[in-house]
Amino acid sequence: MPSLTDGEIRRALNQVGQTGKQLSLVDGEGHGTGRLVLVMKPMPTRVTADWMAQQWRDKKRLKKKLGSYPSLSLGKAREVFARDFADMIQKGRSIKIAGDTRPGTVADLFEAYVAHLKASGKSSWKEAEKVLNKIADAFGRSRPARDIEPDEITDVIRPIYDRGRHSMADHVRSYVRSAYSWGLKSEHDYRSATQRRFRLVYNPAAGIPTEPKKVGTRWLDEEEFLRLYRWLECPDTPVHPPYTRAVRILMLTGQRVEEIARLHVDQWDAKERIIDWSKTKNGKPHAIPVPEVAAELIDSIKPNVHGWFFPSAMNPTKPVSHGTLYAFMWRQREREVIPVVTNRDLRRTWKTLAGKAGLSKEIRDRLQNHTLQDVSSKSYDRWNYMAEKRAAMKKWNAFVHAMLNNKRSKQTKEKHTLIIHSATDGATQQAD
């Protein structure tokens, strides 16, 4: 069967340049069902040459571009045509829906998964991209994703675990498992943005055990709450002021640390005393009226030029990260000047003390944006409960005021008693 040669192509390109007329060269013989064609067109300053897959279907001619010559060589064009189009043409399927049939690589899978997270508005996409980039290098970026085996994953995770980074090791396992899980589901998902198919048979990370989760139970009682709050008002060591304010707002509102840390002027309604998030961790909008003591604190803060209430000390264009707040609190705990507590413990503390203040479990769940799982809440109830939230926060505000004022009065009384005793002891010694 006669086939094209590079010499024929060069002569044809010269001919089109001289005559100014379009010319098509066919690789192989026969009219039949489909062929590989090189279409050359004259342009004002050059001649273009595009490889096309050509198909006759229902007495109509269909074409789909493979690439341009010489970027896509003659040999490579034949390879792509045979791989991605010949079988579809033989089966009578339209070449318009044909795509790259090569199994997706590790890099293809991880990049597509990160793009999925980003498109879904997941804040974790940056961390996932950073972790998976390193893992792709370890596996081999150009290897087919389906070739990765479980022991390769454990070989990457084990050194991290051996360094004592147990949580990080589990995060790596989780990201790899999630990427493969997404790959399996997206294999025939017409909504998927990726054009590559991974031909995955199973998830190689599915059988790797997870790190046992430590369910926290720590919460601050009223004495510990006061001790931490007073230290944050007047720390005995240099601390970037926005950090101490952010933690106080956490204590007063019970919200997720990421949501408070990223508080922006666009989210604060000073007139209504409401913080409004368009999207949160569970993917749902959330708004809360803040207690008066928190509103006064927020109003006293002047957001920076970028609109952040709690900007990073290192990069004011960005808000403080939850990791930075955790680290700054950890250093103070080591000095034993504040109670041992994590950011999540503060959320648990609010939940517990707000219950003591008389707030119902349902309204506390709504204020903390915990997803309600009953059918009514998930599918039917669209009331925003703002009036109920205001009443609850008013009750919580009274509780906080009483707690802070009672403790302050108690401390003042103890201080006065100590002074009186000291004066009495001095007078007794002088009489003696």
Image: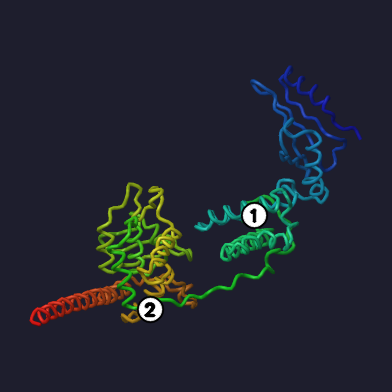
At a point 60% along the width and 63% down the height, the residue shown is 169
Secondary structure under tag 1 reads helix
Q: Is residue 188 visible?
A: no
Residue 220 pos. (x, y %): 37, 76
Rendering quarter of residue 19: top right
Whether residue 196 is situated above or below residue 392 in the rendered picture: above
Q: Disc 1 marks which residue?
A: 135
Q: Where, quadrant-wise, is the N terminus in this rendering? A: top right
Q: List the single residue furthest toward the top.
A: 18
Residue 144 pos. (x, y %): 74, 52
Secondary structure under tag 2 reads helix
Q: Is residue 187 found left or right of 236 in the rendered image?
A: right
Q: List the single residue furthest toward the front.
A: 432
Callout 1: 10 Å neighbours few (<14), some, many (20+)? many
Q: Nearer the viewer, residue 293 or 325?
A: 325
Q: Where, quadrant-wise, is the C terminus in this rendering? A: bottom left
Q: Which mark is residue 58?
A: none
Q: Is residue 250 found left or right of 375 in the rendered image?
A: left
Tell me how many marks there are: 2
Callout 2: 10 Å neighbours few (<14), some, many (20+)? some
Q: Disc 2 marks which residue?
A: 352
Residue 88 pos. (x, y %): 79, 49
Residue 275 pos. (x, y %): 34, 62
At a point 75% along the width and 42% down the height, the residue shown is 60
Q: Is residue 74 found left or right of 188 in the rendered image?
A: right
